Amino acid sequence: MNRTMPGPMARIAADSRPVLVFTVALTVAVALASFALSFASLRDAATWGRVPHALAFLVPVVIDASVLVYGLVALVLRARGRSSAWAWLLMFFFTVVSVGANAAHAYDVGPEVRALVGVVLVALAPLSVLTSTHALASLVVADAPAAVAAVPEPAPAPTVDATPAPAAIEPPAVDIDAQPEPAPVPEPAAVADTPASAAPAPAAPARVGRPVRAVARRVAPVRQATLPGLDVVGAEA
């Protein structure tokens, strides 16, 4: 038996406009109801600090409205990327004061506690003015523009010569530690063994005497007799 697969279940789109409008309306209703209930308790507690009845309604405005103001300021600062810790801290502080005053009014505490609660509520009025003014300045006054560092202009690129540079001839590496090889020594020629008789006899020493002077003799000329009948003179030899 074939079973049909169920289709995708319809879910509420969290980012849809109806959901957003309903959430905002419900939040406003809860805030108004809470403010109405706290308003009566804080107004009565304000009289414990000797606040006139004609001005006692201002105390719940200062306390509960501060909670709403600092909550919104914290959201805006966080969205701007700025520190919102101080806004969250003030929101938490005024919430604790409102809760404590409402609890003291409902519990019907003694005179000493009533006087203490009345003093705290009245003393928070100028503090609320100071903190709310600071919050307003943080939202309205824009931050100073950040100084933009001057970007230096890029240096012109150096011109490169297209002619390749001659390659550098590296000298041959010389090993300093190497010792030079000694030159080969020629071996002496082998002397042939000859018998003692074959050795030449020593020459006789020359006789040293007085030098002989050559005496040149003068030869007298030879006269040839004249032949008879010829008139020829003999030649001298």
Image (cartoon, rainbow, N blue to C red):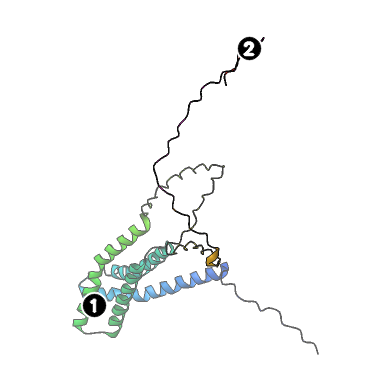
Q: At x 49% / y 70%, what residue is drawn? A: 25
- Alpha carbon of mark 2 to alpha carbon of mark 1: how far? 196 Å
Mark 1 neighbour density, 10 Å: few (under 14) some (14–19) many (20 or more): many
Residue beneath disc 2? 232
**Which residues, given as a range, are shown in magenta?**
206-231
User: Does the magenta portion include 215?
Assistant: yes
Q: With 206 as the anchor, is 104 left or right in this view?
A: left
Res. 222 in view: yes
> Which of 93/225 is in front?
225
Residue 4 x/y as whole percent? 76, 84
Q: Give the number of marks.
A: 2
Q: Amino acid at mark 1?
A: Val
> Which of 30/217 is in front?
217
**What predominant SS class does the magenta segment belong to?**
loop
Residue beneath disc 1? 117
Rendered position, 152 above or below 121: above
Rendered position, 198 above or below 147: below
> Which of 212/77 is in front?
212
User: Which residue is at the far bottom?
Assistant: 1
Figure quadrant of residue 125: bottom left
User: Which residue is at the far left?
Assistant: 112
User: Does the magenta portion include 24?
Assistant: no
Q: Amino acid at mark 2?
A: Val
Q: At x 21% / y 78%, what residue is drawn? A: 116
Mark 2 neighbour density, 10 Å: few (under 14) some (14–19) many (20 or more): few
Secondary element under disc 1, as helix, strand or loop, is helix
Q: At x 21% / y 82%, what residue is drawn? A: 113
Q: With 203 as the anchor, is 49 left or right in this view?
A: left
